[in-house]
Amino acid sequence: MLKKFILFCVVLLIAAPAYATPIGVFDFADDVGRDAGKCVGYGITQYVATDEYRITASGADIYGKDDGFHFAYKQMTGDVKVTMKGEWIMAPDGWSKMGPMIRNGTPGNIASNAVNYFMLTRRDYKRVTLQKRDAVGDNSGKILEIKNQPPVALGIQRVTSGAYTIIQGLADFGSGWVSNGMKIGPAIDEEALFGVAVTGHKNGVKDGMAQAKITDVVYDTSPSLLGVVDIPEAARVDVCPTEISGFKTRTIKAGQGTDLGGDRWTESYPKMNEILDTGFIGATAGVVDFASSRIEQYVNFADGGDGFAFKEGNGFPSHSYPGIDPEPVRIAPADTSYGDVDPPGGDDHFAGEALGCIFLTEGLHIFGAKGDDGAQLKIGDELVGQTTGWNNTGQWLVNAAVEGWYPLEARFFEIGGGADWELYEWLPDGTKILLNDTAAGGAPVLVPEPATIALLGFGGLTLLRIRKKR
């Protein structure tokens, strides 16, 4: 403990002459970085060499309502990306954190709590998290966390695309930058603070100070969103739309003893798609096809219980799956019967599908899905996204090359236990709605034209597409 305290004092002495001047890429009016919130020990940013800094910080649990970290920043306007690399010199707590941050405010009010978004890693480097505080007085919370993948570098960016303003977390695990979650909506002011934050988590002078070596800090004022799926003009359809709003849905069940489990990417999703496409898994027959389908206004299903975000209490009660219950009954929250297929457990190991035509305006759209054991979405021939784990919510960026109607295919699989499935769209203000909620301003979805459905046989990967004559 004494060594850590002595090291902290040495850092203060070395850095003291630089208080009044900008250092490196960081731009300060009157100090070498700032302590945000309630920090017992005084933090400091020390310029060591080109592209290298030492940030020493106190600070308590930044997941709470109060800020507690040291922040080195530039005050900037518009779209900005900031990236960095970091390694701990000392970290007093397992929850000591560092990473790039976007924060509301000015240098004059940085000691106050503020809205912020923080792409962070903990002391052990085994968790990479995009964290948020959406309003002053709120607790902070995570948007997305990736575990057991130590990052090479971290980044965070604000990007405006069409009507959307998006905060996106970035991580490089050794193979280039990937998206690590995003926040939709203009929560951050046009002029904000972009930089690097460090917190000791254990707030104190003698045994609560953390210090990190920060390198390769880069600011980019022309950032681009990562993970955008482009839907080409050639994917548009001409005969798809009808006057029937909604999705054509069906459910198919694996034969007794068939397991849809395993690794999602290499086993579960291929099994789900095979059973929906062919009625078989491998060369084995025995699939129980419920041989029933329904038109549904939304993809908002549950088999027992009342769904995820949309349920009876907010005016969107879940419906049963076609074939599990014969009618689109509303599922009561207390209903734990899990349907009425024999033998017991007969409602496990099934797959669902929803087909439609969606009208997309030109430009960016944000869709997603949540399924109890897995969900995926295709628009045109493009796989927009798949959920990556049990009960995960997928959030996927789609860019339509031109305005028009496009074929849509959504799929879901259930292995055991709960069976909930919802399909979403996010509006530019960050509101999440069920896909096809046109009353809320969402994109319309229409049931495919009947002849097209007949040609599909409910097992095709894509809808029949007849391109517009020029």
Image (cartoon, rainbow, N blue to C red):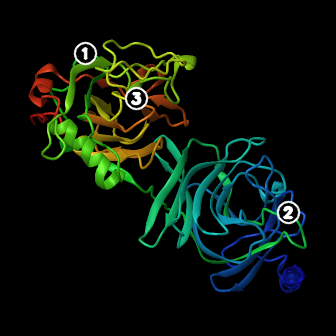
Mark 1 element type:
loop
Residue 449 point in image, percent of width and height = 17, 22
Task: Return the residue nearer the eye: 363 or 436.
Answer: 436
Residue 222 point in image, percent of width and height = 49, 62
Residue 189 point in image, percent of width and height = 66, 47
Q: What residue type is labelled 2?
A: Asn
Closer to the eye: label 2 or 1: 2
Q: Name the residue under label 1.
A: 243
Is 338 on the left or on the right of 13, as rendered?
A: left
Is 286 on the left or on the right of 57, as rendered?
A: left
Q: Which of marks 3 and 2 is nearer the N terminus?
A: 2
**Quick check: 452 above or below 386?**
above
Q: Mark 2 points at which residue?
A: 203
Q: Which of marks 3 and 1 is nearer the N terminus?
A: 1
**Quick check: 438 above or below 208?**
above
Q: Dot 3, crowdedness within 10 Å: few (<14), some or many (≥20)?
A: many
Instruction: Identify the residue at horizontal 48%, vertical 69% (top origin).
Output: 173
Instruction: Identify the residue at horizontal 83%, vertical 52% (top origin).
Output: 112
Is there any visible trace of residue 110 in the rendered image? Answer: yes
Q: How far apart are marks 3 and 1 (CA)?
A: 17 Å
Is there any visible trace of residue 81 in the rendered image? Answer: no
Residue 32 occupies quadrant: bottom right
Is 199 on the left or on the right of 400, as rendered?
A: right
Mark 2 element type:
loop
Q: Mark 3 points at which residue?
A: 435
